[in-house]
Image (cartoon, grey):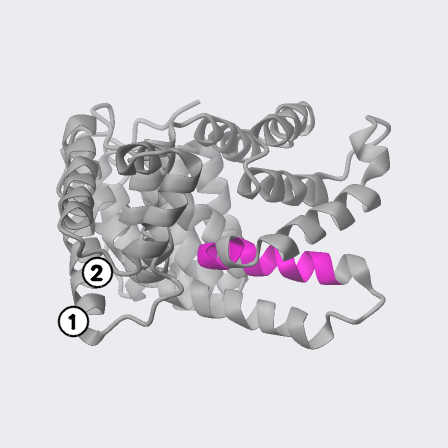
Amino acid sequence: MKSKSCIVIIFLSAVILLSGSFLPVSAKGTNQEASELMKQAEEAFKANDLEKASKLMLEAIKKEPDNAVFRYVFAQILTRLEDYLQAKENFEIVARSRPSTEKGEEYNQKLKDYKKKVKNLQEKFNQKGEEKFNTYLKNQDSKQRLKLAVTLFQAFRLNPTLRYKNYEELKQAMKIYEEALQSSLQGKDWNKEPMLQLAFLYESSNLKDKAAEVYMRALDYIADSNEEFIITHKFDYLNRSSKDKLLDTIEAGEFTQKDLEELIGSQTEKLGTEEKEKIDSMITEARDKLENATTQEEREEVLEEIKKNLLEKQKRGELPGQEKLNEKLKKEGKTMEDYMKEKGF
């Protein structure tokens, strides 16, 4: 049952947990169980018992799975515990969450602040993903193929850019998972974590039907309300439009200069300092506008501005690597507008 907790108290509790400072928590007007769990989590955090604090926050989340404030605090603790994959899962939900009229203005303001912080944390996850990918490269001749595939999954999960730059490795990891999970794929048993990892690889490879099939089946094996929410969230996100996903990626700080370079076909060109600064400025401006957008219409306007900017640059011949992009478009019989639409613009 969803908590009707006083949002102010929840916010204070979140601040307590992150700072370690003491603030009195009143139970007045709150869900008593959620309030008590937050107070216990605070005490565990102050005592530097991160494992206990993590377990208590998870129990709070089970009482209100769609509370992005809870999930942000939980993810911060998981990061401290160096559980980067679970932390990424929860930070991602925060980044993709939308304002809620039911939860109130203060919740929405806190969500806005936390989404900004999630964006700024992405670089740390990118670095961890690079470390995993380098581990794979050093051991790619190993006969432990499943271990290599899991390392690749971790790298791609933590660092989105790696997925696009290493598509052959992505397909290789997917094939290894499929071979190892034949029994689960045939419906004879269920291996929860490996199957959900395979679903992620399917989704990253744009095999939406296969990913959806795994997520739907996973719902038959859920253990609690948190698992149900996470899997449902994955399924719902899978069916979002390319435009919505691109907006989420930009806002979450996962869309980088390299992504934009690849998008406009300039990844093979050596960009000058001025060109790099222009690209960075374009991405930063889009993120800032998305952070302040309160409606879907305002979010889409940001994307339209980026599209308009790129189309104007293309017409003026100002896109880095434009000759190669023009050759590609001519060969495929497409206009720049067609190309941008395919990319989610």
* Numbered range of the magenta stretch: 148-163
Camera-side residue of 195 and 80: 195
Q: Residue under label 2, please give it.
A: 279
Q: Is residue 290 above or below residue 275?
A: above
- Magenta stretch: dominant secondary structure: helix
Disc 1 marks a residue whose amino acid type is: Glu
Q: Residue at x 61, y 39 (%)?
A: 202
Left or right placement of residue 187 versus residue 330 in this view? right
Which quarter shows the N terminus? top left
For mark 1, does the 10 Å Cα neighbourhood hold few (<14), some (14 to 19), or many (20 or more) residues? Answer: few
Left or right placement of residue 303 versus residue 223 in this view? left
Q: Quadrant of residue 291?
A: top left
Indicate whether residue 117 is drawn in magenta. Answer: no
Q: Quadrant of residue 188?
A: top right
Which quarter shows the C terminus? top left
Disc 2/disc 1 C-alpha distance (Å)? 9 Å
N-terminal-most mark, 2 or 1: 1
Disc 2 marks a residue whose amino acid type is: Ile
Q: What secondary structure is marked by label 1? A: helix
Q: Pinpoint residue 20: horizontal percent, then vertical percent.
A: 32, 66
Q: What secondary structure is marked by label 2? A: helix
